[in-house]
Amino acid sequence: MKNSIADLKTKVVIITGASSGIGREMALSLGKAGGRVVAVARRIEKLNELKEIAGETMLTIAADVAVEADCQKVIEQTVEKFGRIDVLVNNAGISMNAKFEETDISVFKNLMDVNYFGSLYLSKFSYPHLLETAGSVFFISSVVGKRGFPTRSGYSAAKFAVQGLFESLRAEWVPQGIHVGIISPGFTDTSIRSKAFNADGSLRGADGKTAGKIMSAGDAAGYILDAVSAKKREVILTGAGKFIVGVNKFFPKLTDTIVNKTLG
């Protein structure tokens, strides 16, 4: 991770979902190293706390990635402050923990607005600046974006959409000189699990059922920064995640049984 920090601290890096979890850990690592990091989240008080620790090279922007105008503001303020954008890390995300048939339609819409459209808006507005710098855009996805999981139908669908966006942009943008990557953590010890939506749209308030070993947010952040620095194309962080994706390619029925036992 030391080498990745040394490389990235010379770049202008936008990280969404920076008020907690993996996003906070990534922003904190870069900020404390003196990097020009742009920390984006809705909760300004959390961003202020982060900047106090990370230092003055950090730019904090209160924004909701589900709002198109907020995403445009993020790009404009970044360029106004630093004059360029080298890396965009689309990390902001929300999850769910409820059976499909019991879940309100509004929950699915919120999941798409944040996980998919938030990534789309920022990628769209950052494009001309990434083109100028031969920069990178990374999507933080999930293993559930490669294989559907029970009680995660809306989250899986949104992350599948992110996967499709990544593959399309990779085909379009890489020949233009912009790197496009996607990184899929497994189950990670962050607030995304306790803040997952219930069926009625309320927040769960407690950790949901998980499968396999839980990775710390700090470890996940380190692996992600290494992948960003190395300009990896597609990375699955955990052994359990790689196992599920691999088995699903050849034995989807068996994978149905596995995921139903672990999360059903």
Image (cartoon, grey):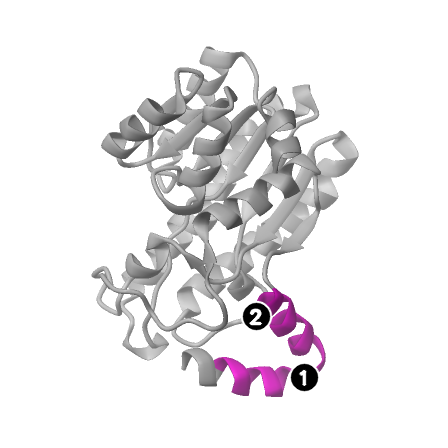
Q: Which residues are magenta?
A: 239-259
Dot 2 amino acid type: Arg
- Would residue 170 be visible to someone looking at this image? yes
Label 1 close to label 2 by CB (< 8 Å): no
Rate crowding at label 1 as few (under 14), some (14 to 19) or many (20 or more) other CA atoms within 10 Å: few
Q: Residue at x 55, y 63 (%)?
A: 143
Dot 1 amino acid type: Phe
The correct choice, above or below, for 152 with respect to 263 in the image is above
Badge number at residue 147: 2
The front one of 172 and 223 is: 223
Badge number at residue 251: 1
Rate crowding at label 2 as few (under 14), some (14 to 19) or many (20 or more) other CA atoms within 10 Å: many
Q: Residue at x 37, y 59 (%)?
A: 95
Magenta stretch: dominant SS? helix
Residue 25 in the image, given as x and y percentages of width and height:
44, 39
- Would residue 127 be visible to someone looking at this image? no
Say how many tags the image has.
2
Residue 163 in the image, given as x and y percentages of width and height:
59, 55
Badge number at residue 211: none
Disc 1, SS? loop
Quadrant location, the C terminus: bottom left
The correct choice, above or below, for 6 with respect to 190 in the image is above
Sequence-first disc among 1 and 2: 2
Residue 73 in the image, given as x and y percentages of width and height:
39, 24
Q: Is residue 251 magenta?
A: yes
